[in-house]
Image (tube, rainbow, N blue to C red):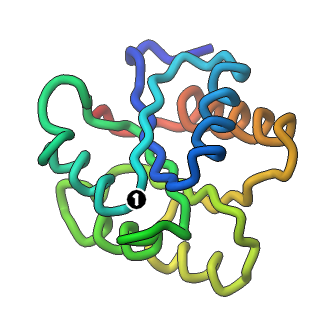
Amino acid sequence: MQKARGLITVVMAEDDPDDRLLVSEAFKDARIPARVEFVPDGEALLMLLRGEGPYGGDDHPPPGLLLLDLNMPRMGGLETLIEIRAQESLRHLPVIVLTTSASRNDILAAYRAGCNAYLCKPTTFAGLVETVQQTLHYWLNIVEIPAP
């Protein structure tokens, strides 16, 4: 059951258009009421979080949850996570790394940088839907997160 806090915005930083499409479809199939917005890299995510450039205005409400790929152009996920955690105004945002890497070094680096969870992208669409559904259920229905 969705907590009575209104529709939450989930922002995913993902450069791969196929992965964005799959995650978008997984959100729909999971039937969890959330608004999902995609940005292509870490620089765009930081601009969105600050309300700068094309991400200013009411079209981009503040997110309540971030999904972050590690391997992106311009600014990768780990660099982005470090920048998010370094800014007092953004430090409260839950950040879930959702990436293809199962590298022990990547996992450790992400947790050291301050991620709240690290998930490896499943290799099947059904697995992705299940992962998205369980993750969003946990973060949107069970855990108390600060209002954006």
Q: Is 54 located above or below residue 72 in the figure? A: above
Q: Quadrant of the N terminus?
A: top right
Q: Secondary structure at mark 1?
A: loop
Point 38% across, 15% down: residue: 6
Residue 90 sits in quarter: bottom left
Horizontal arrangement in the rendering, residue 40 relative to residue 88 (left or right): right
Horizontal arrangement in the rendering, residue 51 relative to residue 78 (left or right): left
Q: Provide residue 3's location: percent of width, then percent of height.
A: 50, 17
Q: Disc 1 residue type?
A: Asp
Pick whichever, 46 or 66, lies toward us.
46
Q: Quadrant of the C terminus?
A: top left
Point 36% across, 62% down: residue: 42
User: How many circles with numbers are drawn on the protein?
Assistant: 1
Q: Is 101 located above or below residue 95 in the figure? A: below
Q: Is 42 located above or below residue 45 in the figure? A: below
Q: Provide residue 147's location: percent of width, then percent of height.
A: 31, 32
Q: Provide residue 123's location: percent of width, then percent of height.
A: 85, 52
Q: Residues within 10 Å of mark 1 (few under 14, many from 20)?
A: many
Residue corresponding to mark 1: 41
Q: Is 48 located above or below residue 32 in the figure? A: below
Q: Provide residue 105's location: percent of width, then percent of height.
A: 66, 86
Horizontal arrangement in the rendering, residue 141 relative to residue 12 (left or right): right
Point 30% across, 54% down: residue: 44
Pick whichever, 133 or 68, lies toward us.
68
Pick whichever, 118 or 48, lies toward us.
48
Point 65% across, 76% down: residue: 107
Pick whichever, 73 or 11, lies toward us.
73
Q: Residue furthest front?
A: 17
Residue 100 sits in quarter: bottom right
Q: Residue furthest bottom?
A: 105
Horizontal arrangement in the rendering, residue 106 relative to residue 104 (left or right): left
Residue 33 sits in quarter: top right
